[in-house]
Image: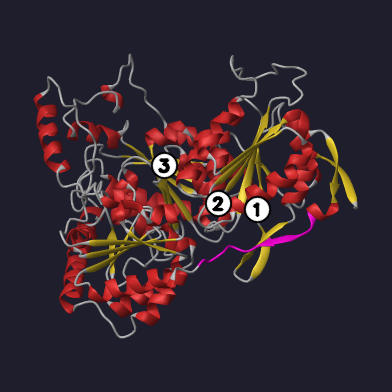
Amino acid sequence: MSTLRLTAAQATVRWMTRQFVEVDAAEVPFFAGVWAIFGHGNVAGLGEALEGLRDTLPTWRAHNEQAMAHAAIAYARQMRRRRAMACTTSIGPGATNMVTAAALAHVNRLPVLFLPGDVYASRRPDPVLQQVEDFGDGAVSANDCFRPVSRYFDRITRPEQLLAALPRAMAVMTDPADCGPATLAFCQDVQAEAFDWPKAFFARRVWRIRRPGPDVRELDDLAAALKAAERPLIVAGGGVLYAGAEGRLARLAQTLGVPVAETQGGKGALAWDHPMNLGSIGVTGSSAANGAAAEADLVVGVGTRLQDFTTGSRALFAARDRRLIQVNVGAFDAHKHGAAAVVGDADVVLEGLEARLNGWRAPQAWRALARDAVVAWTAAADAVTATPAGDAPPSDAQVIGAVQRAAGPDAVVVCAAGGLPGELHKLWRTQRPGGYHVEYGYSCMGYEIAGGLGVKMAAPDRDVHVMVGDGSYLMLNSEIATSVMLGKKLTITVLDNRGFGCINRLQQATGGAPFNNLLADAAHETLPGIDFAAHAASLGARAEKVGGIAELEAALARARESDRTSVVVIDTDPTISTEAGGAWWDVAVPEVSSRPAVRAARAAYEAAVKDQRTGD
């Protein structure tokens, strides 16, 4: 057997360069590059190996481990899971900083390869710097935190273990049903150990993303259910986009006259003005979509995991006679909520429906009701996003309107967590697939700017607009500097409502007193006067603060002409959110409280819980 003598780290990097996937009929490297912050746990091993292949596998330096992982994850999502990145850190805080990002990737079913350094397998210097010691288990390290948030986890204590571990990790990251993060905790002494590797291990391999078809009986049952339905509704999730099924869904919805509602992950599957697009669904949904969801006698989820924001905590699909059918490539998701399951690739399933439903259309009355609801919702959305009169701080919706008017039809909006995702889900008008990138599976504050960087790396020809609140900006802003360093231009709008405005509103809606959310309601000796524009400028961005919507639109026009990342800051009202649309969300209210407002909120909560359908 012909062999090649390399260190374990060198073998890992070489192997990564030999993994390819099919994208649009072309074979491209699966790994677009590696994000790295080096420390004693990876600089001598993986650092040396990455430098040796830097012209084949790019390595980028970030400023925060969690942020660089967010960028990698955002890249994978924008690439529809067809390509990915890897992230390497030292042991200790460098590794555990990535755990939050790993959870985000796990929840959102997104591929990323984590290569955190680990303790010495030999234990010669035990305990090494930054090592976590378990008093009852000598095999535990801080990297065990990755176990519950990785689809595949392994600890590499011998070089030859990589012969099995690397292909297993790749198989998970390219599997449409099991897709998610893979973690190889890489003992730092093992990284530097040499081994005689079979040359066949480094043979060029092309991985093809499978498109499993459904069981014919399940597909026949779905077609029969649609033909029998009087009020059918399709709920489009992120799986529609990952399967590249948006074109087929658009044709099918129009041909059959079946209205479509979009989850956060599925938004953009249809153009916002598609005649059968009812808009967003659920807690952050449009009145058109949620009205249809409450009346539908058949709900067909396509590529959605049906989390509680989509289902209104299982209270939204309220018709007594309604049936639920779940089309999903993963059986785990297809069987949720007592649904009849159709397990298969979204595009393959929709293709099968086209032939089976040829000549059938949804009842005219249902189609007319959907069209009228869209007209009413469009008018409501126009009203809340219009330029305000007067000098009062604008609402989030009014800022969204200004950004939308400044952004071209090919732009991508990026956001995560807080009140903005709800407003964007309702109000942002996506013209092209991939134009809406909001992380709401893990709802992770701090994702926005780093995620915007990853999106720009995946879609360099599209303008990327990041919308971020002041609270999230303060949590994680370091990759502004990275975007400038890499020449990846972002347009970042910072909405400063002086605190955590979304949770402040939720706190009061559940009867609580304003407490510890807005800066004014938190413990302090002096309220900080934070100059976000000056801070962003210090990181290398072009930055300015504006006084209202007209100034914001002018600043966004200047940002569009800028050659580097631009940050525009505007003060907003923390108390206003769009009243139109929306649905109930199960947020438990204390059973006992001295506050009358809490007791009233509890009574309303107990009444609402009765509408939940938890038995099916």
Q: Crowding near pointer 2: few (<14 within 10 Å), some, many (20+)?
A: many
Where's residue 305, x and y in %?
A: 38, 53
Kindly identify the amino acid type of the residue bearing the numbered disc 1.
Ala
Residue at (18, 52) in percent of width and height: 580
Where's residue 533, x and y in %?
A: 44, 36
Real-space Cα separation, disc 2 to disc 1, in angstroms: 9 Å
Q: Which mark is residue 442?
A: 3
The magenta segment is: 202-212
Real-space Cα separation, disc 3 to disc 1, in angstroms: 24 Å
Residue with the mark numbered 1: 32
Is residue 211 magenta-colored?
A: yes
Kindly identify the amino acid type of the residue bearing the numbered disc 3.
Tyr
Query: Is 241 left or right of 358, judged from the image as shown?
Result: right
Query: Is 18 left or right of 565, judged from the image as shown?
Result: right
Is residue 472 magenta-colored?
A: no
Kindly identify the amino acid type of the residue bearing the numbered disc 2.
Tyr
Query: Is 19 left or right of 504, judged from the image as shown?
Result: right
Real-space Cα separation, disc 3 to disc 2, in angstroms: 16 Å
Residue with the mark numbered 2: 75
Q: Is residue 384 above or below residue 272?
A: above
Asked if the residue under mark 1 is in contact with the one under mark 2, i.e. CB atoms within 8 Å, the reply is: yes
Please say whether residue 98 is visible from this viewpoint.
no
Where's residue 482, x and y in %?
A: 59, 41
Q: SS for tag 1?
A: strand
Residue at (55, 49) in percent of width and height: 454
- What secondary structure is the stretch in magenta mostly built from? loop
Q: Which mark is residue 230?
A: none
Disc on the earlier residue, 3 or 1: 1
Query: Is 316 left or right of 482, judged from the image as shown?
Result: left
